[in-house]
Amino acid sequence: MNGNSSSSKSKPIRIGLFFSDTGGGHRSATEAIQAAILLVAAERYPNRPVEMTIDSVVENTHPLNRRFVQLYNYLLRHQQSAMKYYYWVIETFKPNDSEIGWKIAKPYVEKTLRSMSADLIVSVHPMSNQYIARALKETGMNAHTKLVTVVTDPNGDFWSGWACQAADLTIAPNDLAHRRLVELGVEPSKIATMGMPVHPAFVSKPNCSAEEFCLSLGLSPELPTICINSGWAGGGNMLAIYRALKNVKRKIQVVFLCGHNLKLYEAIKQEVGRSSIPTAVLPFHDSMSDLMAACDLMVTKAGGLTSFESVARRLPMALDMITTPMPQELGTAKMLVEQGLATAIVKPEHIIAVAENIVCRRDIDAKPLPVKHQLDQVDAVFKIANTLVDMACAENHMSASPTYSVSQSAPVHTSHAGRPQTSVGH
C-alpha cells in the first residue's frame, strides 16, 4: 500500500494498545509506543487520522484478575522477597491460558475488541496475549485485525506468557529474549528483535539544563546529584540505601522518588529532617527524561523500562539487589552489571563507594554504549512504531522503512487505566 494513495487518505489507522498496571513499566512502554506511532504516522501518512485506544485489559476483565494485579503491586511495594512465589504460582497454573481464565475474561475482551474494530492490536503485557489471541480467533476478527506482542523484559528468564504462538508478530528487545521465545515455542520467523520501547523523550534533548533542573527543586547546580527511584509501586530497599549515604564524605544531593507509597513518602520526609544531605522528596516527577538528564547516578531496581531509560540517557545506575530481584528482572540486572552500565548494591553500605566516585556527567563526554544485547539501540521505539504502522496499514511488516529523527516532537494524549476508552485523533 502506498502511504500517499488516494484510497487510503480518509481511512483512519486504528490501533489498540493493551497493557496492565503491574508496576509502571508496562504503562511506560505503552505510552512510548503510542508517542512514536503518532510521530511516524504523521510523517508517513499526514492525511490519515490515527485512532488509538489504550486499555489496562487484565484488571478490567474481571474482579478476580484485578485482585491478582493488586496482589502483585502489594508484594512489589511491601514484600518483594515473596515475589518469587507469585511468579511460581502464575507460571505453574497459567491463569492467562486456562479455560477458567478465558471464561471470566471473554466477555470484556470480546466486547472491547468489537468496539475498537482495530486494524492492529498491540499487547504489552504477558498476561493479556492469550486472552486477546483467542478472542480474535473466536470472533473471526483475526481475519482483519492483526496481533503484535511487544516484550518488555530484556532477558532470558521472563514470564512464559510473553510467548504467544497465535500472535502475528512478537517484537523482542534483544537476543536473550529472542532465544527465550524460541525455547517457549514461538516460530523464529514470527519474531523480530528490535530493542526496548523507550519513550522518544529519552533520546531527545532535555527541556532544560541540569542547572535549571536542580534549581527548580531547590538543589545546587554544582553538587553531584543522585536520584533514588523507588519505582511506580514505591518498593525496594531505598530508605536503607538513603540512610547509608550519610557516611559519604563528599558533598552530594538527592532526589528521592517515592512512587505510590504514602508510608515511604512520610518516612523519607522524616529521615530528611535528620539528614545533612540536601534532598528533594517527590512521589513522582512529571518529566523523568529531564530528571535523568540532570542527575549523575540513578539508584533503582532493575525494571526493564526504567533501566533502559537510564541507558538511553547515559545515566549510570546503582541497582538495588539487597533483596534478590524478581525472577523476570534478575537477568536484566546481571546483564547491566556485566556490561558496565550499573553497579550491584547487595548491602546498603555498598552505595557509599559508588557515591564517593561519582563523576558529574556535565564534566565528561558520554561513552559509546555496548552493542551486546542491543543495548545501543536506544531509539528502537521508532523502528517498532514503523513496523506497527506498516502492519496496521496492511504493509509487509518486515519491509524496510524510513529512518525517523529522534528530535521530532508531537503531543501525546493517553486514555489511562480505569477511565473510559477514548480515541486519539492526530
Image: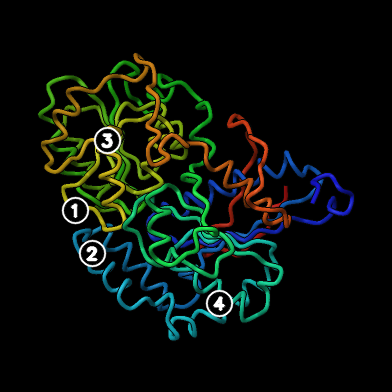
What residue sits right under mark 2 in the picture? 84
First in sequence: mark 2 or mark 4?
A: 2
First in sequence: mark 2 or mark 1?
A: 2
* Residue appearing at x 55%, y 66% in the figure: 167
What residue sits right under mark 1 in the picture? 324
| Mark 2 → mark 1, Cα distance in angstroms | 9 Å
| Mark 1 → mark 4, Cα distance in angstroms | 35 Å
| Mark 4 → mark 3, Cα distance in angstroms | 40 Å
What residue sits right under mark 4 in the picture? 134
Horizontal relation, residue 293 to residue 360: left or right: right
Question: At label 2, which amino acid type do we have?
Answer: Lys
What residue sits right under mark 3 in the picture? 342
What element does badge 1 sit on? loop
What element does badge 2 sit on? helix
First in sequence: mark 3 or mark 1?
A: 1
Question: At label 1, which amino acid type do we have?
Answer: Thr
